[in-house]
Amino acid sequence: MKKSIRLRARAFVPALSVLSLAVAASVQAQGIEINPVVISASRMEQPLSEVLSSVSVITRQDIEKSQAPTLVDLLQGESGVEYGRNGGPGSQTSIFLRGQESKNLVVLIDGVKTQADGGGFLTVTDMPLSQIERIEILRGNAGALYGDAAIGGVINIYTRQGKGAPKAYGSIGYGSKNTADMNVGLGGTSSDYGFDVNAGQKSSTGFTSMDPALSNRVNPDRDGYNAEYFSAKLSKKLNSDTEIGMRFRTQTTDADYDAKSNPDYSASLPTDVHRSLKKTNVGSAYVRRQVSDAWSTTVNFSDSVTSYEEFKNGLNNGRYNSHQSAVNWSNHYQANPNTAATAGLDYVSDKHEEYNSFEFEKRTVAGYVGMTQKMDKLTLQANLRRDLISSDYRDALSVSSLQPNATSTLLGAGYQLTSTWKVTGTVSTGFRAPSATEISNSPSLKQEEFKSKETGLVYADQQTLGRIAYFHTMTHNSIDWFEDAQGQWAVRNAGEVENKGVDASLRTRWMGHSVKLSAVTQDPKNITGGYAPGRRAKNYGSIDISKVFLDYELGVKLFATGARPNFNEVNSDMLAGYSIWSFYASRKIDTDWTARVRLENAFDRHYVIAGGYNTPGRGIYATLQYQPK
């Protein structure tokens, strides 16, 4: 990463305003799911109000109402979530959960851990929202449940599954920057079979990714993208106790971009055309059996392949392939209404190949156990996980091996103060093994180690669920990139990193309105290096209010964030704070058809989330949706 020219500072709106939609109507707001059942916090089903860790949920209704263009745009405004993106959709994207590096985050899709690229970064940030049924966001160290890298937390994505009689569904949309979006699907159940099939395409002419004011070497052309995708799920009940199923999804994303870094540091020309092509194929199969009234077990097999290529003026300019195979065996035992246990084994083989550079293979064998126990007003949770990892690195000059084995733990307790108030607390440990790219630069790296603690206060009734939590995470042997004396980028174990703060989330029905609120104040810092991590603000949050009356729903969302450093370094350029207003509306045409419209960045605010790269200006988008009830 090269240092960008300093961007002009802009004023920051220091606090979120309290909003209200002035809509006169006597009809109550459309119901929102206040206290859904979640799985991520303990690997067992629990009402959201009872979990000890901090969890947020995004439902299918939330996804449709938001009309968000991408996964990261949907996540923006959720408590604890920040992101950086080098341009528009389809470009390199990082998600920071609770102030952690994007590498310190696990994303699951239908319970299967998704691939990371050679740098350890996520490869699913462009997953189409039409395929998603719900998302659970687990904030905080979950290494004892999910292993390597689950430090900032876990984003658990569940894909759509047809219910009831088979029905077709779909939508078509168009908007600013020639953005076109179309998807169709068919899902439901028939006899002992359940299925869902979904296909779609999204494209846009986009905008110039890099700010031409950065350098006269920047190509000022528009950087568009095109994504095509398909998914299919099929399940069959063999009998009342046993179910088998298969899943498959594929996606191809073709995106234009500008030079990855300040072009003054490279041989870029203003006429250069850069393009990336990413293809992902994922297949899985499972067997689920209810062994007894108390014991259920699931075995899941998965295989995924990601290929990524970069082109400069039509010629190949770099590529990699990643291949992940995994087998997971999970068990749940409900001894009685107050006592439950979980246990399982994971095997994962990750292979990564950078063409004409290096090969990297990592094998993980892990076992985990966990238990929750209720005793009157007291709830206890304990989780233990052991990961045995072996990795091999090979290039033209060297061969090296690492075995970064680790044991991760979590202990938690909650106490019901009253019928509506509950206090919670957890302490946990976790780790992250060095990525392929990090090992290629420094084969002797040590694994990162983490210790976390969290104390929370929960309020829950039939209309409201709110949580506020204090968190503190210490990182030992932090792996950081730096510029050495020869001006080359290198990696090292840099010492200690700390983040502590408070995050809050609220979901409520208030005076006929649906309200979602999030707020975070934190203090991330590299203690050894004496600097704050890049692209993470000390204060940020959002408020989203909507109202249903007759056949209409109107909503407004405000997201605001404070200033952030651009890079992980002392005296980094600062990115100015900003606030963005978006408005959305929908109208039920009949029981099956809905028309939607979204005004994004309504006041055309100029803002920066990655130094030197542009962000979308004001845009308006319309969607026609077909969804039979």
Image (cartoon, grey):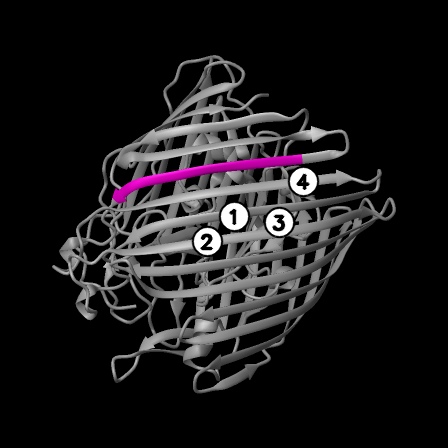
Left or right of 587, for residue 240: right
**Mark 3 Cα within 10 Å, few/some/many (few <14, many 20+)?**
many
- Label 1 belongs to which residue? 250
Examine the structure image and report whether residue 196 is included in the region drawn in magenta: yes
Helix, strand or loop under label 2 = strand
Helix, strand or loop under label 4 = strand
Label ID, residue 234: 4
**Mark 1 Cα within 10 Å, few/some/many (few <14, many 20+)?**
some
In this view, 579 is above or below 500: above
* x, y percent for residue 628: 57, 21
**Mark 2 Cα within 10 Å, few/some/many (few <14, many 20+)?**
some
Q: Label 3 to label 4, Cα distance in Å?
A: 42 Å
Q: Label 4 to label 2, Cα distance in Å?
A: 23 Å
The amino acid type found where label 4 is placed reads: Leu
**Mark 4 Cα within 10 Å, few/some/many (few <14, many 20+)?**
many
Segment colored magenta: 195-206
